[in-house]
Amino acid sequence: AEPIGAARRAARRHGLRLIGPDSIGLAVPGKNLNATLLAHPPRAGDLALVTQSGTVASAIAAWAHRREVGFSAILTTGRSADVDAADTLDHFAADIHTRAILLSLHRVDDARKFLSAARAAARVKPVVVLRTGRHEAQAEEPQTHTGALARPDAVYAAAFRRAGLLAVDTLDEMFSAAETLRRQRPFPGRRLMIVANGRGIGALAADRLADQGGTAAEASPETLEAIASVRHGTSTNPIDLGVDAEAQEYATALGPLLACRGNDALLCVHVPTARAGARQTAEAVGTWTQ
């Protein structure tokens, strides 16, 4: 501990920050910087990856290399003698080259600092968090100071939820989140049009939109007239296509709804039925996203 403390004090005297120990390094692909032990140089992109574990970072980077997913930066904090997860959240929340943050944690030693940084970051960008060692016995953990988060997984889950982070439990879920974020396009506004095959499921989506501070878009009279043949009696958002709506009904509705200037984005909700399977409907919707 003493050599680490001495290095930290020396760095601070010269205005430097330290990463590690037990870090595999830092990469900023857009600057052609790769000071890591990763198997392949990461591609440039707009996802920031921050982990405490070098092997977790390596696993995610290897997956990203195969799928051609790029990063604004990859950083492993290791045991965080100086730079910790909260510091990285503060940095990447303000980084114009980062659109979303992927975070992997084993422990949080300064709960107040971390939660403050997490809340601030989640207000401006998506933050996905994967925590490792969720079922380790607390007795096996090193002694922490009083600011550390308690070990029980429920405490972490509640803290992540209150901070606005999206928690995942497995690397596969982290991969799926990264793939979704890579394909997601920024919305030009907050007005969302919802189209569904049923009032109940559409209402659930509308409730969630309101909970998150979004705005239900209003379809113009011309748009409503254009989709009159497939509307199931409703003229308000959510647009109900009826429980028996098939892929063709969705395809018919999407053109006028996407062209409507009263909305910034369109959410299609579909519950599979005996008449309309999910695959056919997804393919019909997918033709409009090419």
Image: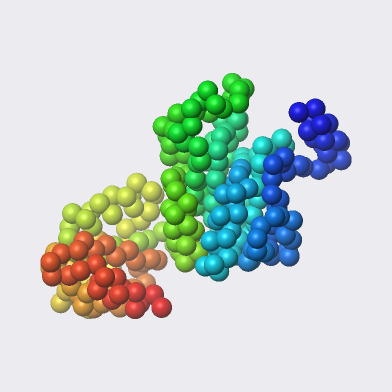
Question: What residue is drawn where x is 78% and y is 33%?
Answer: 4
Question: What residue is drawn where x is 57% and y is 60%?
Answer: 62
Q: Quadrant of the N terminus?
A: top right
Q: Quadrant of the C terminus?
A: bottom left
Question: What residue is drawn where x is 76% and y is 42%?
Answer: 18
Quick one: which residue is furthest to the top in this view? 146
> Residue 106 falls in which quadrant of the image?
top right
Would residue 28 be found to the left or right of residue 114 on screen? Answer: right
Q: Give percent across and percent down for residue 157.
A: 43, 36
Rendered position, 116 above or below 224: above
Nearest to the observer: residue 25 or residue 259:
25
Would residue 138 be found to the left or right of residue 284 on screen? Answer: right
> Residue 191 falls in which quadrant of the image?
bottom left
Nearest to the observer: residue 253 or residue 12:
12
Would residue 17 be found to the left or right of residue 260 on screen? Answer: right
Question: What residue is drawn where x is 55% and y is 45%?
Answer: 104
